[in-house]
Image (cartoon, coloured by chain):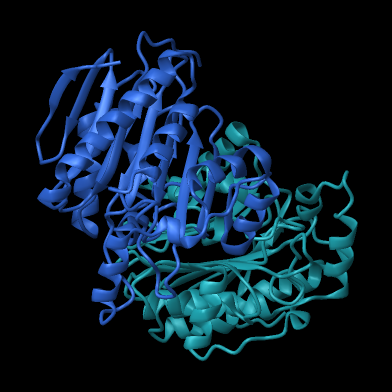
Amino acid sequence: MLPVLVVHGGVGIIPKERVQLSCAGVQAAVRGVYSKLQGQGSAMDAVVEAVTLLWNDPHFSAGLGSVLNAMGEVEMDAIVMDGRYLASGAVSAVRKVANPVQLARLVMDKTSHLCLTGEGASQFARSMGVPEVPEESLITEYARMRWKKNLAADANPVECQMGKMGTVGAVAVDAEGNIACATSTGGLLNKMEGRVGDTACIGCGGYADNRVGAVSPTGEGEAIMKVTLARLILFHMEQGRSVEAAADEALAYMKDRVGGLGGVVVVDPQGEWSVRFSSLQMAWAAAQQQTLHYGLYTGEHFTKNIDNPY
Amino acid sequence: LLTFLSSPVIVVHCSAWAIPDDMAKASVDGVKSTATAGFLAMKRGGSALDAVELSVRALEDNPTFDADHGAVLNTNGEVELDSIIMDGRTLAAGAVSSVKTISNPVSLARAVMEKTDHIMLTDRGANMFAESVGIPAVPTNTLVTECERTEREKAKNYAVEVKEGHDTVGAVAVDCSGNVACATSTGGIRNKMVGSGGYADNLSWAVSCTCHGESILKVTLARLFHVEQGKRAPEAVEVSLRYMGDRVRGGGAILVSRTGEWAAKFTTERMAWAAVEREVLWYGLNPKEEFKETLRQ
């Protein structure tokens, strides 16, 4: 049943004209990485590579095309977690890097800390030789237009954001049974400068434990934080719930208790996996053995042979 | 979900670590007076949220605890503070990380919770928000004690971490309406993430944790107690700390439930803590200590 890779391209409503490309994007990311997992690649390498591929794909509002904060800047959060030793690395509110998930991994591998923020994260990036990219290179016309629109006093950025994805993530269990997760985001549309959402917060935007499983969420960040969604799902799994039931129960709780919607990808050490979301859509794909699984709307679960390029 | 308690309860701590003997008395005195002040505020009708904020402010202002005045310096010689506050009734939370030049980060965290749609602000954005709500910046000098400056000079030859986990202060409380709240503040290693340094939920507990921040984050210590809901407070803390000790290393935590049960436990060498319940002040420093005295008002 091993290895397994599951990725998501964020919750939200994708405009019809982009549906094909978004679905193609998640499938391409999974296909591109799964063969390495089959070739004894590590779960950690797999999730970082998958998230990097999604991040670089302009059809997800992550990376190029990220939403802007209130000042019109791009501030990004990312997390990785290695289920073997509960090692983790995260960056929050970091600017002008091409791939915050890779910087998060450097935090894990090269420092004794778990999270670096803002200017400190940038300093660290420089010390690691991570090139600074101009802010302009991360901003699209579309993002700028939505930013302007949401500067109006009566705008509802959270609702507007549910109409567009901004977070990408992955979970994996490799052939040796090691588990990892990675999540990356441009954050919340028109957020305050310095706002950190769930993605950089261990237990909220991601969690991985070889003994239990891994989760990468997406959705309303503040709601995810209030219930520490990733950790909550794994608690339910520790108490014997299946990967689906654990996710459903936690998402329902989040909706009831704090009124938030979201979606998750989940995997356990035996290779059981699930994709659940309380929003209307979430572009996702998974690979296990010879099968590629994918879907977009609630209830969808398509499969095809992983070698089938169509 | 309404519970009415006959007595509010508060527990405070100022870090779980090997507190040196020459700081022991000041630490214990500090937590005792703080717990007393927090309790009296609730007796006068204040909420659990008010009590934990004022307690952590008092602990932040006390130079014996590095949490704020006396905070450790980062490699740039700056003071960077983290804080979290959480309301168990609604799960509303506010947190700040890496704020500089703010005297009481717990109050800034509360402002994030009450005046923004967000939970957490960091770095420059957090400082800008402080300015926008009229919380004044103070010069780094007032936040750094002579003691810390000397320590830093001595430790310059070592790697980034000057000290470990002994600069965190925290409080948990339940008021007469049965609402729980927590607050945690630190000048050092990050310990302010929701679910790690603190968590509060009326359905279970309010928790504030201390010790090596990275270890606490790895097990999301404050949130572990969720699993222990069926247990009595002291057992819940012990089980969670044991889990943390097995997976990473030792720490400390204080906890209170909406029914007024409380606990203060640690697997480090010492933790100065104090609690007040029904006009009785409890406190301790060394493992297994639980002294009590009648509350002096």
In the picture, measured across the screen, residue B150 lies left or right of residue B223, that is left
Residue A153, x across and y down, in percent: 87, 46
- On screen, residue A180 above or below B48: below
Q: Quadrant of residue B263?
A: top left
In the picture, measured across the screen, residue A242 lies left or right of residue B158, that is right
Question: Is residue A283 visible to us here?
Answer: no
Foreground of the two, A77 or B143: B143
Residue B68, x across and y down, in percent: 40, 52
Q: Quadrant of residue A149?
A: bottom right
- On screen, residue B146 above or below B266: below
Shown colour of chain A: cyan
Residue B280, x across and y down, in percent: 23, 16
Q: Quadrant of residue B209?
A: top left
Q: Residue at x 39, y 45 (%)?
A: B60
Q: Residue at x 39, y 22 (%)?
A: B258
- On screen, residue B162 above or below B145: below
Q: Which chain is blue?
A: B
In the picture, measured across the screen, residue A294 lies left or right of residue A137, that is left
